[in-house]
Amino acid sequence: MMFQLPFLLSSECRELAKDFVVAGTASESLYGACESMFKEDMEPEELFETVSQSLLSSVDRDCLVVWGGHVYVVTPTEVKERILKGRMD
């Protein structure tokens, strides 16, 4: 199978995704948050905010998830990583 770049794939995904992928113990609530907040053609900063809010709101609902996460925003010119810190209780 030939892939056109870029493409989305996760370790828990059995097919290529069109818009986004999620994985982990909070994946069910992540799907809901991402589906309600994601829209096409977001600017990098808007995408970061959307991903961050989706991640933080989802992990608050899962007791197995730890303190935060890493968000990578990939554009044609750069890759930015930011670390989110969430609840620690």
Image (tube, rainbow, N blue to C red):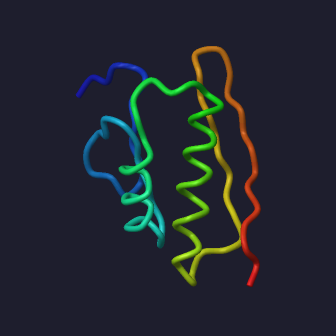
Name the one closer to the observer, 40 or 27.
Answer: 40
Q: Position of residue 76 (x, y in %)?
A: 58, 16
Task: Judge left or right: residue 58 versus residue 18.
Answer: right
Q: Using the image, determine if residue 85 lies above or below residue 14.
A: below
Q: Quadrant of residue 5?
A: top left
Quarter holding the C terminus is bottom right
Q: Position of residue 38 (x, y in %)?
A: 42, 41
Q: Measuring 67% from the left and 58% from the top, which residue is drawn there?
A: 69
Task: Judge left or right: residue 64 versus residue 19.
Answer: right
Q: Measuring 62% from the left and 39% from the top, which residue is drawn there?
A: 48
Task: Judge left or right: residue 34 versus residue 75.
Answer: left
Q: Position of residue 83 (x, y in %)?
A: 75, 51
Quarter holding the N terminus is top left
Count the marks. 0
Q: Measuring 34% from the left and 19% from the top, which residue is drawn there?
A: 4
**Which residue sits furthest top?**
77
Q: Measuring 59% from the left and 22% from the top, which residue is drawn there?
A: 75
Name the one closer to the observer, 83 or 9.
Answer: 83
Q: Quadrant of residue 18?
A: top left
Q: Position of residue 56 (x, y in %)?
A: 61, 62
